Image (spheres, rainbow, N blue to C red):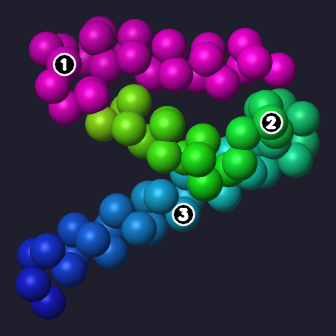
Amino acid sequence: MHRGEHVGRAQAQLRALVGDLLADGARSGQLPDDVPADELTDYVLAALSAAAGLPDDAARERLTIVVLTGLRSTH
């Protein structure tokens, strides 16, 4: 398997996992249901991809908190 295929497959699995979690959260009423799950998945993964450029674990933790707070605050 080529490296590109491996990375693509891993990204697809991550997207599916996050999408399923967000859809479950919306169905249970814990997360907003006014944004389609696929779209919300794109937003969350894009925001969290910024973690790679952050200087330390504390900054990555703050980013995660911001994303989670944003999800919860719309409900």
Closer to the observer: label 3 or label 2? Answer: 2
Was residue 68 drawn as part of the magenta stretch in this picture? yes
Q: Residue at x 13, y 14 (%)?
A: 55
Residue 52 placed where, x, y %? 19, 32
Mark 3 burial class by Cα count in 10 Å: few <14, some 14-19, many 20+: some
Residue numbers of the magenta segment = 50-75
Q: Which residue is mark 3?
A: 16
Q: Secondary structure at mark 1?
A: loop
**Magenta-colored segment: predominant secondary structure:** helix
Q: Nearer the viewer, residue 65 or 44?
A: 44
Amino acid type for the residue under numbered disc 1: Leu
Q: Secondary structure at mark 3?
A: helix
Q: Is residue 1 left or right of residue 11?
A: left
Amino acid type for the residue under numbered disc 3: Ala
Measured along the vertical axis of the image, is residue 12 above or below residue 27?
below
Measured along the vertical axis of the image, is residue 45 above or below residue 24?
above
On the image, which quarter does residue 3 sit in? bottom left
Q: For residue 10, say whether it is visible.
A: yes
Q: Residue at x 78, y 50 (%)?
A: 24
On the image, which quarter does residue 72 sit in? top right
Was residue 59 drawn as part of the magenta stretch in this picture? yes
Q: Which residue is mark 2?
A: 34
